[in-house]
Image (cartoon, rainbow, N blue to C red):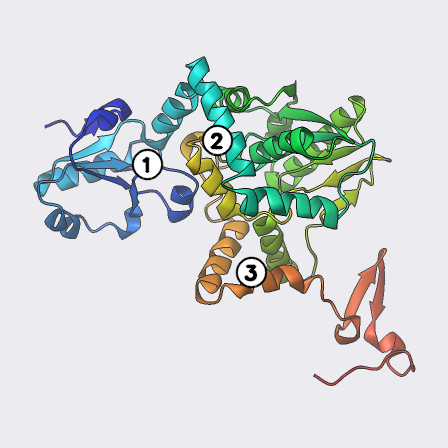
Amino acid sequence: MSGEATIRQLDRDTRPKRVIDIRSRDSFALGSYPGAENIPLEEFDAEAFAAASPGVPVYLMCQRGVQSQDLADELQALGCEAYSVQGGYISYLRDRLFAQTEDPELAAERRQKAERSIIKKFRKQLWSPFTRALGEYQLIEDGDKIAVCISGGKDSMLMAKLFQELLRHGKQNFQAVFLVMDPGYNELNWRAVTENARLLGVPIQTFRTEIFDTVAQAGGSPCYLCARMRRGYLYSQAKELGCNKIALGHHYDDVIETILMGMLYGGQIQTMMPKLHSTNFPGMELIRPLYLVREADIIRWRDYNDLHFIQCACRLTESCASCGGTEQGSKRAQVKQLIRHIAAQDPVVEKNIFRSVENVNLNTVIAYKKDGVKHHFLDAYDGAEHKTTEV
């Protein structure tokens, strides 16, 4: 009995079977084989599993098909019909990303389904919070030309489709350019971005930089420098195209994670603003139209339409789309897990974190900064204008 199976062999096996994804829970949450169960490798008890699955074929999937092979051998020794999926999640990702645009008629049907689902099935979860954010934070004004920046992930691709729907069914007082920067993606990631844009009917404009190579040579922690350079290039390219705004795909969950990260790791209270004036590119603004959209709803839209986007295309860390990485071990991943754990016990916590920066009472804080100037409560403590209610 062979201990390996290809994705196609797994697809063709019509028997009752179990597909077990042994990657981390965060990796699994971002995408896996349909119907797969998640048992992280460090939690996998081979003997107990074999005893609980007599006579059932088992397919094991890790990131690249290495760890799953060792586990398949162990299960086979315990009498299981166990297979390691060759190439792991990366093989599955390649297969699905590039198969989805092969048939033009099927691709057109899938595009229409994805568009309809935004307005109908996910209207309350996606369309409504998107348009509410546009109005509440005044993100679009008459005559705007907006560079909708697409990284290739689920968030920015959905944002692009929302803008298309807005132009089709809503406001038509602005223009949109769908801008994609290649900072040095590997071939798989770059093809994934362009193929998904073609599948979803997004007319992208692309340009290339050497950010990944530059950051790799700089040494040290690459993330901050990479983010600054990427944003600078996006502003510059957007300005050349006559745009006055760039739109980024940060969502509600990014906002609450940023708030908590600032307190826990930065010793400060701050948020990810819904819009900002650029300091280095006069006349340019950054807007975040997904500000009120929940990540879980983006994932539901993606999975409902059987779409497969890159997860993270960074070449400099283990968080790469081609291996299914998810920034595991990063501070943001830790905060995401913390919020998920607390919210499971009390769902209102997420909303309270979001609202906390809207309800700051300056009479009850020790100090704050405004335009770079620090103000301390003692500055006006004895003044008539500063009366604090006892807490």
The amino acid beneath tag 2 is Phe
C-alpha distance separating marks 3 and 2: 26 Å
Check disc 3 and report the residue beneath it. Answer: 350
Query: SS class of the residue under badge 1?
Result: loop
Q: Which residue is mark 1?
A: 34
Q: Looking at the rendering, which quadrant does residue 179 occupy?
A: top right
Q: Position of residue 361 (x, y in %)?
A: 76, 71
Q: Which residue is mark 2?
A: 309
Residue at far right of view: 384
How far apart are the alpha carbons under marks 1 and 2? 15 Å
Image quarter where the N terminus lies is top left
Q: Nearer the viewer, residue 135 or 303?
A: 135
Three-letter residue code for mark 1 = Pro
Regarding residue 326, the answer to whether it shows in the image is no
Question: Could you classify mark 1 by the number of other residues whose Cα lies within 10 Å: few (under 14), some (14-19), or many (20 or more)?
Answer: few
Residue drawn at the location 50% of the way across and 21% of the way down: 199
Q: Secondary structure at mark 3?
A: helix
Instruction: Answer with mark 1 or mark 2, whichever residue precedes in sequence.
Output: 1
42 left or right of 303 in image? left
Above or below — where is 375 with respect to 260? below
Q: In the rendered view, tell whether residue 95 sits above or below residue 80.
A: above
User: How would you rate the neighbour count of disc 3 (Cα within 10 Å): few for under 14, some for 14-19, many for 20 or more?
Assistant: some
